[in-house]
Image (spheres, rainbow, N blue to C red):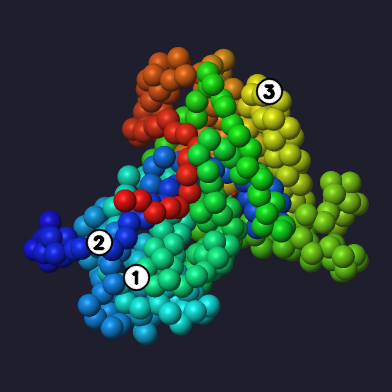
Amino acid sequence: MNEQITSFVNSFKSELKVISPGRINFIGEHTDYNNGFVLPTAIDKKITFSFRKASSKTQCTILSTTYQKLFTFAIDEITIREATWENYIVGVIAEIQKVTNGVGAFDCIIDSDLPLGSGVSSSAALECGIAYGVNALFELDMSTLQMIQLSQNAEHNYVGTKCGIMDQYAVMKSKEGTVLLLDCLVNKHTYIDVNFDPYVVLLLNTNVSHNLASSEYNTRREECEFVVQMIQKEDAKVSSLRDITLSKLEEYKSRLSSVHYERAAYVLEENERVLEAVAYLRTGDLKQFGSLMYASHRGLQHQYHVSCPELDFLVDFSETKEEVLGARMMGGGFGGCTINLIHRDMVDTFIKEASKAYKKTFDIDLTSFVTVPSQGTSMYS
Ligand code: GLA
């Protein structure tokens, strides 16, 4: 640690502490920005924040122990910064300023055990933790939905990813032992109790993050919007893919490029899979639930084209193993983790085998962890 960091840490008297978790998503990928359904929940890996009001009127000091970096910014002069992770923070503050003028200067120490760039949404965890902490520190009285939406806006306006609302929603609203069925048309959720026993949730991290992720993400969104606009010209009631059925899409197939058709078909099928998966979850049919996870991956791989060889390899590998009920890529794609529902007795053996095969094929070390549905962003003492 350099001297400046050491002295900042040693003199820091925390006024409040917040934890903000990462998230997983069982099924419903790239459906959120199409007003569809998703099935995420928070995990037990998280970012931890210590906040205090700053001694200065306008100057904030932020320390990331992960990056071993200290930076300052003035709350009355927020501009886009070079480092992406800093933009998640200043972006949230700028968005809060659009809804209230009560934000003062603050200092914060940020510590994390969440793997970065792995599709478990360390970015939403960071945004939501900042929003939650600043809301409490300055008694801003923002609603949870307000904080969710302004965190999403920070990502649009300060980072440039036109993300949907799933990550921030799951990070903020999740409850231990449950998954969220979120309807992104109305931003309303239902908690579903889960008990996977004797199965557990295992994440396999490809440890790749192809830099296509952000640009291709925005392109997918535009492709879906293109389909909506085309249909809208003839049917003004259509305002998102949620208003279109698969049979209606068929009517337009000959007028759409195969790429546009595949993108929209994937989204409509994925929405159906989410609702089906929820029904299986409710009756405890984990086998059928798992096969929908595989089907979701194949859609992302072949129709939506957001997977990559490393993710496909791991899902293919899982599919050969009886002990894995379901597996799929998770999040935006082009790298990050696969989520696997696996028999708890086989976890160690499976990890050993998968790591060996993955290393042999890509010469990359696989990392992995078992996780459980956990509480969303909250105070801790
Ligand atoms: C990223 C985005 C989410 C969602 C997923 C794909 O994680 O932040 O809004 O679109 O990709 O499902």
Q: Are marks 1 and 2 in contact (CB under 8 Å)?
A: no
Q: Is mark 1 within 8 Å of ligand 1?
A: no
Q: Describe the element under mark 1 as helix, strand or loop.
A: loop
Among numbered discs 2 and 3, the one appearing first in the sequence: 2
| Circle 1/circle 3 CB separation < 8 Å | no
Q: Residue 285 has which mark? A: 3
Rendered location of residue 30, percent (x, y): 63, 50
**Against 54, is 166 above or below?**
above
Placement of 11 over or under 198, stated as above or below: below
Q: Position of residue 278 (x, y in %)?
A: 70, 35
- The disc, 1 or 2, on the residue closer to the chain's N-terminal end is 2
Q: Amino acid at mark 2?
A: Ser
Please indicate whether residue 1 sits to the left or right of residue 242 in the image: left
Instruction: Answer with mark 1 or mark 3, whichever residue precedes in sequence.
Output: 1
Q: Which amino acid is tagged 3? A: Asp
Please give the residue where the numbered disc 2 appears in the rendered image. 14
Using the image as rendered, state which of residue 228 and residue 191 is in the foreground. Answer: 191
The residue that appears at 47% across and 19% down in the rendered structure is 344
Quickly name the residue at label 1. 82
Closer to the camera in the image, 179 or 357: 179
Q: What is the three-letter code of the residue carrying label 1?
A: Glu
In the picture, the disc for residue 184 is none
